[in-house]
């Protein structure tokens, strides 16, 4: 037992990603009689300049070289381990696209009047009141999109709930309403609309495509995701580990190393 304890003080700790892997590098050495001695000057320097590395040498401390990961909790497994974090799906927002229409121009303007100026929508599950568009003659689709966006965002039901949308005229000649939120609860639907709006704006009563949540894996096993936090699935080799993922691209974000430290 004594030999094992001595070895733990003199051996290098596997998995440490830092400047120290042994106690000797901190100024702590085993003397001939088995006692420990401390080089006060060396240890004080390490304590003041490399405190986090010092903590990682003595205890279980997760480290990662990735700027897109922040460890929130450690795995239950106390042994040396490395866990690969990957994003398999990025969050998206709910959206609804109308049918393709003829793009308005000075020769063929889009006219908003009493026959196509009202609609009602639901965004993120919140129903608006009746929304009135600005009546007039438009020869630029971008101006129509801007007005639809402004009138929807001015609705009191939506604004009080902190909900907003963006509206654009797409390259394939469709007006698209997109929720500002992301995730599976991000939705857009048209609940009511004037009868001639389908012909002029391409809109009709319909539900759009729901948004999707951030998704990913830890060591190849699907992670439980809450917002930006990935938590290892119960029963997996990484159970207990959770990380905040800040990456915005698919694929591997980087490994998280969890050495056991001298205490382990």
Image (cartoon, rainbow, N blue to C red):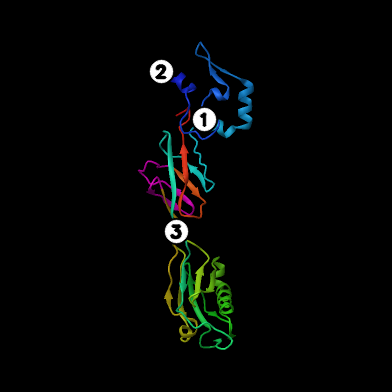
* Residue ID for mark 1: 57
Depth check: give the residue in front, 165 or 155: 165
Q: Which residues are magenta?
A: 218-240
Q: Residue at x 50, y 80 (%)?
A: 119
Label 2 sits on a secondary structure element that is loop
Circles 2 and 1 in contact, beta carbons < 8 Å? no
Q: Residue at x 54, y 46 (%)?
A: 67
Point out the tag, 2 or 3, that comes first from the N-terminus: 2
Alpha-carbon span between mark 2 and mark 3: 52 Å
In the depicted structure, whether residue 237 falls above or below residue 158:
above
Quarter occupied by the N terminus:
top left
Residue 191 position within the rendered picture, expressed as x and y whole percent measured from the top left: 45, 77
- The number of callouts visible is 3
Label 3 sits on a secondary structure element that is loop
Which numbered tag is attached to residue 213? Answer: 3
Alpha-carbon span between mark 1 and mark 3: 37 Å
Query: Quick check: is 248 in the magenta stretch?
Result: no
Crowding around mark 3 (Cα neighbors within 10 Å: few <14, some 14 to 19, many 20+) is many
* Residue ID for mark 2: 1
């Amino acid at each position: 037992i004594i030999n094992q304890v001595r070895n733990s003080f003199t051996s290098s700790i596997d998995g440490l990603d830092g400047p120290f892997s042994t106690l000797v590098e901190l100024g702590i050495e085993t003397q001939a009689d088995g006692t420990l001695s401390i080089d006060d000057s060396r240890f004080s320097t390490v304590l003041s300049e490399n405190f986090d590395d010092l903590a990682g040498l003595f205890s279980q401390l997760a480290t990662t070289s990735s700027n897109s990961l922040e460890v929130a909790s450690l795995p239950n497994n106390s042994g040396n381990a490395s866990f690969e974090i990957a994003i398999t799906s990025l969050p998206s927002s709910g959206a609804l696209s109308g049918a393709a229409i003829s793009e308005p121009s000075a020769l063929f303007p889009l006219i908003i009047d009493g026959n196509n100026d009202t609609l009602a929508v639901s965004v993120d599950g919140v129903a608006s009141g009746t929304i009135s568009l600005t009546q007039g003659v438009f020869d630029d689709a971008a101006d129509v999109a801007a007005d639809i966006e402004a009138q929807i965002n001015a609705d009191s039901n939506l604004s009080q709930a902190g909900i907003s949308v963006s509206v654009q005229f797409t390259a394939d000649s469709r007006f698209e309403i997109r929720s500002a939120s992301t995730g599976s609860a991000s939705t857009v639907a048209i609940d009511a609309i004037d009868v001639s709006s389908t012909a002029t704006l391409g809109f009709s009563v319909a539900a759009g495509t729901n948004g999707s949540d951030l998704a990913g894996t830890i060591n190849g096993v699907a992670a439980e995701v809450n917002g930006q936090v990935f938590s290892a699935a119960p029963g997996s080799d990484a159970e207990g580990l959770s990380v905040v993922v800040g990456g915005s691209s698919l694929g591997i974000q980087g490994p998280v190393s969890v050495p056991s430290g001298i205490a382990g």
